[in-house]
Each structure stands twice: as C-alpha cells, then as structure tokens.
C-alpha cells in the first residue's frame, strides 16, 4: 500500500511487514524518515520539531550541520553534503554540483518498465517521485515498488536530461537510503573461483564499507548483495536488511557511517570507470535493487528473497516445474570424447534414471583444449560423427533429453570468427590484449556482434532437438574498450556490454521458450538476481566437493532460492579439492537444489549405480519441496561440525532435512538440532528416525544429530500426520 499525505508532503509505503516513510522537507529535498518495522506516518515526524535539525532551511546557505546531516533518498553532490552522492551529473561547462528537489509524483498499480534489463515481472504498486536538479537540466525519477505479500521493496532511479545540451553522468546509483544510527554489522558474500559466496560479516564504523565488483561481471569475488545486521540478530530473531541488485555487471554497494553516526546505504552500477553521455531528451535507467527488511533474523530475510525471486523475477513457466536432472559430461571426459564415448555415457545415464544428457565444452570448431574455437558455433563432425543431431537422436532413443554447452560471449583468437572479424573482440589495436583461459571477450556493446551471435546460436539450436542450454562465461572483462564508441563514451563500455548480454539472453530465451537455460560463469561467477530473470537456475560453483558445497550453498541461500542453485554429484577424489567423501553424502548435498550428475556413469561401480537410481527417485519425491519450500538453516558449516538445512513445504505438511557431519570427533554425544519452522501445533513423523513428535517439541527440544564418520551425510523426510 502506498499513501500520500499532502499536508506534510509525506509518503508512507507499506509492504507485508515493513514501512518505508519519507517526506519532502521545507527546502524541497526528499528525506528518509524511516525504513523498518511497521509504523504510521504520524504528522509530528514531518514537523520542524522532529525533523528540523536534519532538514535544512531553504534560505540558509550556511552548509554546516545542514546538508551533511540530512537523510537523503537520493544524495546530491557539492551542496554541503560531504558523504558519497547518489549521482554525479556533469554539465556542459564542467559544473558538477546538484540539488535534487521534489517536482511531482505518481502512484500506480504495477511496476516501472526497465527496458532491456531484468525487472519485476508482475504485480506490485509503485510510487514514482520525480526530482528536478536545480543545478542542471537533469530530472531524476525514483521508483519504489511494494507488494502486499512481500517484505521486499524494489527501487531504481531513472535520470532524464530534460534540456537540449548533453550532460555526462559520472555516477548513477539505483537507490539510496539512510538510517538514524549505524549500530549494524554488514555482511557481504565474498569468495573466489570454486569458493563463491562466503558470508563475511564486519562491524560498521566511521567511514565507508564498499562492496563491489569492477570486473564487468557480478563476479566470484563479491556478490551484488549486502546485509545490515543488528548486534543481536541471529538466524531466527532480530532485525536485518538486505540489499540485492538485480544486475550482473560491475556494481557497488556503499555503507557509510557519517560524522553524526548515521548510516547511508546506496548502490547500483559501479561508478569506477563509469560514464554515460546523456543527450537532450534521453533517459538513463538504472538497474533495479531489491531491498528486504526482516524482524525475524537472517533466515526470514532469505525466505523473503526466495519468494521474491520465485514470484516476481524467475520465468513463471519454469520456476516451479520439474527441473532437468542432468548428467553432464564435463568432468567425465573434459575435451576428450567422440561419438562412441558419448553414446556409452548416454546409455548408462539412461539406465541410471536421470532425464537429460548435457554435452559440455568441446563439441564445436576444432576445440580439443581451451585454446581455440570459441565463436565457431558449428559442430566438429570429426569428433561427433553425424553431428549434434546424432547425439540428440541417440538421447531420444533412450528416453533422454539433450542439453548443450555454449559460451556465447567469447571468442578465441584461433577461430574462424576471429580470423574473419578480429574487430569483434573487445581489444584495442596496438595493445596486447589480456587473455584469460586463452580467450577474449566479444564486444557486446556492438549490436552487430550480438546479432551475429544470435543468428549462429539460433541455427545451432534449430539444428536438432535441444532441450537445455548451459550458458557459460569463463572470463571477466579487461580492456573495457570498444572501437565503436567515441573517446568520451568509453566509460559506457561495461554497462553497454551487460545490456548486450541481456539482449541476447532475452532474444534466445524468447525464441526458444521450450529450452531450459541454465546460467554459468566458470562456476558461480555471475550468480545474481539479474541472471535469474533469464535463467531459472545457475551453476553454483565448479567446486562440487560435498564439504565445500555445504558452505557455498549455505552462503548462496542468504539471498537466493535453493531452487536457483544447480548442484551436482561428482566423482571422488573430487577434481577441485582431491577430497574423498561418501557417495551418499554427495547425493544428499546435491539434493538441496536442482540436482544432477557430473561424472562418468560408465566408471561407476554397481553399488554406485544403484545409489544414483535411488537418489534420483528419492529426489523426485521431495522435488516440490526443494522448488517451492521455505528454507531453514539449522547448523552453520562455517562454525559447527555439522551442516544442516531444512526445507518445509508452504503448507507445512512435509519437510526435508539434509545434513553432514564434517569430522568424527570423540565424545560429542549431545549434538541436537532444533527443527525451527514446522507447524508447532502439528504432529510429525520423521521416517528415517522412527520418531513421531509435535512440531512444538521438535522446535523446542529438537532431535539428536547422527554420529557419522567423516563427511557422513543424512536426509530425513518429515510428514505431518495430524
Ligand atoms: C566452466 C564451467 C564448467 C565447464 C567448463 C567448460 O568452467 O563452470 O562447468 O562447463 O567451463 O569449459
């Protein structure tokens, strides 16, 4: 619900369990009053007595203690506010100061259009407030969308040049909000290849915490997410706020504690190496940001984000439908395969009960290693006799669907594409390009490059029956230069690149609605809310080790649904860590997401084959809970010797618990897990333990965790019997 109090020029936004309140102060600035637990927009909040000391006198240009203490909904530059601004707008004369004052507003059902970028698909109610910059020709429209059934508030900003001469944007964030105190710690999801999204929490103090990627991708190293956490907040209690950008490129989220002890949080496209020329009449639209408030701990925030993504961002036709249970040949063969070998794998995969065979890297051009052929999206018929059609038909003949790996954004220098169009690579003539995995990035800022890739990929996808695509992205950008842009527009490259990627993703998913697309970026290097708009699931990490995965999946679940995580069982010793873990543990950990296999089925023992068949059938029994259920994180693998998570169906009639004991240690007799999240008044049966107990008891007292050998895993299915 969105209310406007005309007498006070105040806006009161109400989501499921939060309020967001702001008003236009006497100087015309839009000022944050409250974000958090439900409150009313009582008049005194907007009076001089309450807000006066933070609300500047319009006629007083003594900036001391005026602007620098004002809580801003979109912060200005060069007007006495010495904290970071939300936008920097440079006029033709080089003047950069701004003064964003209220001009008008509109309240409407639905959400703003964010052409060419990921966005809310349906529903909501939106407040659009237009601010005029008194010092330039820019106008800023701030969009706020709330939902009756969600604790998420979606925001973004649109900057329009209402004048005739161009202005330059040096920063254009999506949102800014302020808190009256800074008594928070801040969590970010940090990592690296094969170790993505580790939650790292540090105290907020004076100065700025800057969470960012400048890699042209949201990145393995830092997810485009941050959470503010109150001192005593836990998984199950206390306040926290999430800030999650629906964006897959370079980003920044800033949390700045000011001299007065207040906290400003803002973010959007990374302003490092960013610039955008805005000609007269043009508008720059910033990516949407999903803010989330929870009074019931981190767990509730995660469940709200999971519902938000499932209800409003991910393709509704795919989100709750059965996911392909794939067997992927990458770790089975790497580049070393031919039709015979694949057919052997396919036959065995069909026997195991999986439903999709995915042919990974190496099927095209002359690609026998990672040095060549990216961009040459035509089949290598020396390797694959009969082409992709033969593989697809083989799959069909044994009842499997067929999936294919692609890396559409890349080009190898040793490729026909590069020989014909060296200019398609994002390089600068005369400068030795930075290679990564021996490859270069295509210049997706250029429409003709995106069009070319669309056409060649389209022909591949039309060449035979293909049911699934794994869209990979194995290196980040380096030179950030496009030969097609003038020198004063090179700062636009990173964002224009992202717009090119979104355009291609939109066109391909639109042209092939029957194909299931999975995102991937050297594992989980682009696991973000932007990609989830196009791809219902993403390859979580190249690290499939069943111990490391407990941590990676735990961190990822902070702000994404488990159904978005693609999780595979792989061979041991694990290819990334060399660790040995039991086959059963690998199976249960991989069942906490879109499950599948990443191994050579012909190399499995009979016992392992039987285990796969059982795992697939067990998974199908609980798949609906994995896709649609609520997640409760019970034992933290970063601090406990156990990992344990529980998924509860929305009606609380069933639950699915998965756990792992990391190491055998002596004398740990009383490790209890409390099953928070069940119906307290219901009675549940835990099949595997032979226990029948009330939800109340299971939550208050809990059950003993099993004493398992190193890396032993377990799964329990709970059913409500009355
Ligand atoms: C990336 C992916 C892997 C695999 C390889 C193929 O690393 O994350 O799963 O597809 O590329 O080159």
Image (cartoon, helix red, strand yellow):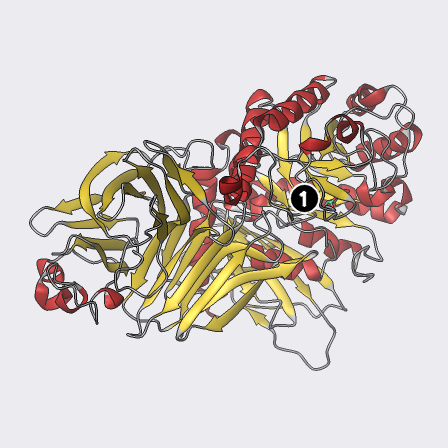
The image shows residue 683 at horizontal and vertical percentages of 47, 56
Q: Please give the name of the residue rendered at 91% of the width and 31% of the height, measured from the top-left corner.
A: 338
Using the image as rendered, state which of residue 673 and residue 317 is in the foreground. Answer: 317
The image shows residue 382 at horizontal and vertical percentages of 92, 25
The image shows residue 254 at horizontal and vertical percentages of 43, 61
- Give the residue number, with chain letter if any, for mark 1: 595
Using the image as rendered, state which of residue 627 and residue 9 is in the foreground. Answer: 9
How many numbered marks appear? 1
Residue 339 as seen in the image, left or right of residue 640: right
- Classify 443 as above or below 61: above
The image shows residue 38 at horizontal and vertical percentages of 24, 57
Residue 502 as seen in the image, left or right of residue 47: right
Q: Residues within 10 Å of mark 1 (few under 14, many from 20)?
A: many
- Classify 260 as above or below 319: below
Q: Residue 599: tell me if it is visible.
A: no
Please tell me in which quarter of the rendered image ligand 1 is found: top right
Q: Please give the name of the residue rendered at 72% of the width and 54% of the height, measured from the top-left corner.
A: 543
Q: Please give the name of the residue rendered at 20% of the width and 58% of the height, measured from the top-left corner.
A: 39
Residue 355 as seen in the image, left or right of residue 202: right
Residue 75 appears in which quarter of the rendering?
Answer: bottom left
Q: Residue 212: tell me if it is visible.
A: yes
- Classify 342 as above or below 9: above
């Amino acid at each position: 619900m969105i209310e406007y109090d005309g007498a006070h020029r105040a806006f009161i936004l109400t989501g499921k369990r939060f309020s967001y309140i702001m008003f236009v102060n006497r100087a015309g600035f839009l000022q944050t009053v409250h974000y958090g637990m439900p409150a009313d927009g009582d008049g005194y909040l907007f009076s001089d007595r309450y807000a006066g000391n933070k609300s500047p006198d319009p006629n007083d240009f003594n900036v001391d203690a005026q602007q620098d203490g004002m809580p801003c909904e979109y912060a200005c530059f060069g007007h006495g506010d010495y904290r970071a601004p939300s936008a920097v707008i440079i006029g033709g004369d080089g003047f950069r100061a701004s003064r964003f004052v209220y001009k008008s507003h509109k309240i409407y059902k639905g959400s703003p259009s964010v052409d060419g970028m990921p966005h809310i698909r349906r529903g909501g109610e939106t407040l659009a407030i237009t601010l005029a910059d008194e010092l330039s020709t820019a106008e800023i429209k701030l969009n706020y969308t709330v939902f009756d059934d969600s604790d998420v508030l979606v925001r973004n900003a649109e900057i329009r040049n209402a004048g005739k001469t161009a202005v330059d944007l040096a920063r254009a964030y999506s949102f800014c909000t302020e808190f009256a105190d800074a008594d928070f710690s801040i969590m970010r999801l940090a990592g690296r290849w094969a170790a993505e999204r580790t939650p790292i929490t540090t105290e907020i103090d004076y100065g700025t915490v800057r969470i960012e990627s400048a890699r042209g991708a949201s990145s393995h190293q830092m997810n485009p997410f941050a959470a503010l956490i109150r001192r005593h907040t836990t998984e199950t209690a206390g306040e926290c706020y999430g800030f999650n950008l629906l964006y897959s490129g370079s980003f920044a989220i800033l949390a700045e504690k000011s001299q007065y002890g207040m906290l400003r949080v803002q973010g959007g496209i990374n302003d490092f190496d960013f610039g955008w020329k805005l000609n007269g009449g043009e508008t720059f639209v910033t990516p949407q940001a999903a803010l989330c408030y929870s009074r019931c701990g981190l767990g509730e925030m995660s469940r709200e984000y999971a519902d938000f993504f499932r209800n409003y961002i991910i393709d509704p036709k795919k989100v709750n439908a059965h996911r392909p249970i794939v067997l992927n040949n990458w770790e089975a063969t790497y580049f070393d395969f031919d039709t015979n070998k694949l057919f052997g794998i396919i036959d065995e995969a069909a026997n195991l009960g999986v439903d999709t065979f995915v042919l990974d890297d190496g099927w095209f051009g002359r690609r026998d290693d990672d040095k060549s052929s990216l961009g040459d999206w035509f089949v290598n018929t020396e390797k694959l006799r009969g082409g992709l059609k033969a593989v697809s038909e083989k799959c069909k003949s044994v009842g499997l669907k067929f999936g294919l790996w692609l890396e559409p954004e890349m080009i190898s220098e040793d490729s026909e594409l590069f020989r014909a169009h060296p200019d398609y690579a994002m390089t600068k003539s005369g400068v030795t390009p930075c290679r990564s995995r021996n490859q270069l990035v295509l210049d997706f800022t250029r429409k003709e490059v995106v069009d070319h890739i669309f056409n060649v990929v389209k022909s591949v996808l039309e060449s035979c029956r293909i049911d699934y695509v794994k869209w990979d992205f194995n290196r980040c950008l380096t030179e950030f230069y496009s030969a097609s842009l003038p020198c004063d527009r090179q700062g636009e490259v990173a964002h224009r690149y992202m717009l090119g990627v979104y355009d291609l993703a939109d066109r391909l998913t639109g042209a092939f609605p029957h194909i299931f697309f999975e995102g991937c970026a050297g594992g989980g290097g682009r696991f973000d809310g932007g990609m989830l708009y196009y791809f219902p699931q993403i390859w979580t990490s190249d690290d499939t080790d069943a111990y490391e995965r407990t941590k990676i999946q735990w961190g990822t679940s902070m702000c994404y649904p488990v159904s978005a995580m693609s999780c595979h069982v792989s061979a041991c010793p694990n290819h990334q860590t060399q660790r040995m873990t039991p086959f059963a543990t690998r199976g249960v950990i991989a069942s906490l997401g879109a499950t599948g296999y990443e191994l050579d089925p012909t190399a499995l023992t009979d016992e392992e084959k039987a285990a796969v068949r059982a795992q697939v059938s067990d998974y199908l029994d609980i798949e609906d809970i994995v896709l649609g259920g609520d997640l409760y994180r019970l034992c933290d693998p970063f601090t406990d010797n156990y990992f344990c998570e529980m998924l509860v169906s929305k009606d609380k009639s069933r639950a699915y618990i998965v756990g792992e004991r990391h190491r055998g240690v002596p004398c740990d007799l009383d490790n209890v897990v409390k099953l928070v999240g069940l119906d307290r008044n219901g009675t549940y049966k835990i099949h595997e333990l032979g226990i029948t107990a009330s939800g109340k008891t299971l939550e208050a007292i809990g059950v003993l965790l099993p004493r398992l050998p190193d890396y032993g895993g377990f799964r329990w299915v709970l059913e409500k019997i009355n």
